[in-house]
Image (cartoon, rainbow, N blue to C red):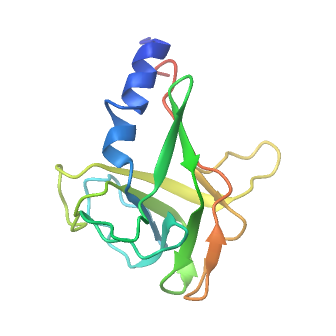
Amino acid sequence: MISLSTGLRMAVAGNYGVGYMMNGGVIRVYGGTRVASPDNAPGTTEIGRITTGGLDWYPDTDPNNAGLILQLVSPGALVNSGEWRLKGSATGTATWFRWCWAATDPQHESTYYPRIDGDIGIEPGEGDPIPDLVLATTAITTATARDIESFLFLLPMEDA
């Protein structure tokens, strides 16, 4: 079983890896069935977006400073920094997300673009698995504007 040192985990999560690539990016929210890989096109309509303050986000230039800001915490984790807000763009039930970098990503099938996909759900009951992104409710409409209380991306200590 492979074990990662705290120093490596901090480097991969921080200035040399995920944190570096994903800082200033956006989280796109989708309904329906999650695709098999982040390399795949979403295959469904985006129903919301998580940005700083719920502001409109534009890749490459980000004139509104809406890109998501991350904070590195030991041992090898990233948490949200600032006010992250989900803003709905269509009606649906949020089931999964795609975290994209700050540069342009056309969302077609590709092995080039840095992306992280994860599951969305509500606060689990005792003994239930915790979804990757927890929302108070998964019902999304064009009127949705909901703060994201916390976001955690953690690199595991060991490969299970």
Q: Write the residue at 26% across / 59% down.
A: 40
Quarter occupied by residue 64: bottom left
- All told, the count of numbered labels is 0
Above or below: residue 144 compared with residue 67 = below
Q: Residue 61, located in which quarter of the rendered image?
A: bottom left
Residue at image position (57%, 59%) is 120
Front in this rendered view, residue 107 or 21: 21
* Residue at the image point whose x is 65% and y is 51% from the top: 150
Residue 34 at least partly seen: yes
Q: Nearer the viewer, residue 91 or 101?
A: 101
The picture places residue 129, in percent across and down from the top left corner, at 68, 45
The x, y position of residue 158, in whole percent, is: 49, 18
Q: Nearer the viewer, residue 46 or 51?
A: 51
Quadrant where the image shows the N terminus? top left
Q: Is residue 153 above or below residue 30?
A: above
Q: Position of residue 62 (x, y in %)?
A: 32, 66
Task: Residue 107 in the image: state x and y as whole percent.
Answer: 25, 66
Q: Is residue 155 above or below residue 48?
A: above
Residue ranking furthest to the right: 126
* Residue 51 shown left or right of residue 85 in the figure: left
Q: Nearer the viewer, residue 87 or 139?
A: 87
Relative placement, left or right, of 36 versus 146 is: left
Is residue 94 at least partly visible in the picture? Answer: no
